[in-house]
Amino acid sequence: MNPPFENRQALHAFHDFEPADKDDFRTDVLAGLGRAQKQLPCKYFYDEAGSKLFDQICQLPEYYPTRTELKLLADKAAEIGDLIPEDAVFIEFGSGSSVKIRIVLDALHNPAAYVPVDISREHLEQSARTLAADYPQVAVMPVCADFTERFELPAGTPAGPLNGPRVGFFPGSTIGNFDPAAALDFLTWKADLLGPGGGLLIGVDLKKDASILNAAYNDGAGVTAAFNLNLLRRINDELGGDFDLEAFAHHAFYNAAAGRIEMHLVSNKLQAVHVDGKRFSFEKGETIHTENSYKYSIAEFHNLAAQAGFQAVHTWTDADDLFSLHYLVVG
């Protein structure tokens, strides 16, 4: 049994790599708005306000991925727990509010540590405090980092070094936010981080009827629209932008040829916007491309994982084939 890891110790063990500082944000925003097809990286959605809005999205009736994945995790928890080695160092890439991890932690056999990795410092610290209090037998080692880039894992806990097998957790079908080439790069370096024999439990959204996909990203309550527009609010607040949020509209649609949902912000009129002293012109109907969400067949994803150095050990899907969970091992 691991020694108790008190709440105050989790905070003491907070590893902050200072991701997405203002200079990075400024550079990426100015470069993206200067492109012929204006675009903004979706990783900047997740400031504190954006993270809270995404938590609301996950509760929406139209947004099937979260509830479907949660049910899969709950239904298959015992099988998942049996696949993951004892004393594993369990690393969650993009931990968010740490809801899904509770199902997995309850099923694991004596994990050595839980390492939540997230770009949103405030959100991560808050969820790590709560989780450490609720799971005092698990060493909670939060890492504030951009999980899409390389970073170092904590070397150990107050109880000693982290020498156990590494198992990653990447739920929510976030892999779909990468284009196929970037997804391959991401999985390849995750295989390198986890090491030979390391595991990865990953959620992948499946290809399905376009009407289901379009409804999931265009909810009737307008929460996804607020989430998308929050990115412009963040630019105004942090980079001195003068975006008129009412002059832009949320637009999301399934691009069947590319196999992805595209999310855009559409300019409602001819206008000019200033950010950090630079001027950007918009035609009426011109868009800022803010996110892609690629959908896969099971065969397509297994092929991608194999190219990255993983072997597919087990795959679970719901009864309607909306969503899939995969347990992969580094070969």
Image (cartoon, rainbow, N blue to C red):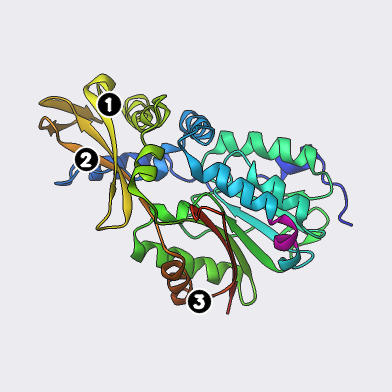
Inspect the image, locate mark 2, and give the three-letter code of the amino acid beneath it.
Answer: Leu
Q: Residues within 10 Å of mark 1 (few under 14, many from 20)?
A: some
* Residue 10 within the magenta-colored segment of the rendering: no
* Residue 77 within the magenta-colored segment of the rendering: yes
SS of the residue at dot 3?
loop
Q: CA distance from mark 1 to mark 3?
A: 43 Å
Examine the rendered structure and indicate whether residue 216 appears above or below residue 204: above
- Mark 3 vs mark 2: give the one in front: 3
* Residue interval drawn in magenta: 76-81
Q: Position of residue 71 (x, y in %)?
A: 63, 47
Q: Residue at x 45, y 67 (%)?
A: 301
Inspect the image, locate mark 3, and give the three-letter code of the amino acid beneath it.
Answer: Gly
Q: Position of residue 309 (x, y in %)?
A: 50, 76
The quarter of the displayed image where residue 159 is located = bottom right
Q: Position of residue 233 (x, y in %)?
A: 35, 26
Regarding residue 66, the answer to whether it shows in the image is yes
Which residue is identified by label 2?
A: 33
Q: Mark 1 or mark 3: name the one nearer the start of the chain.
A: 1
Examine the rendered structure and indicate whether residue 166 appears above or below residue 48: below
Q: Nearer the viewer, residue 218 or 273?
A: 218
Q: Residue furthest bottom?
A: 331
Q: Main secondary structure of the magenta part?
A: helix
SS of the residue at dot 1?
loop
The quarter of the displayed image where residue 44 is located = top left
Q: CA distance from mark 1 to mark 2?
A: 12 Å
Q: Position of residue 171 (x, y in %)?
A: 56, 52
Q: Nearer the viewer, residue 319 or 105?
A: 319
Which residue is identified by label 3?
A: 309
Determine contact: label 1, label 2, CB under 8 Å. no
Number of the label disc, if any, that sits on residue 241: 1
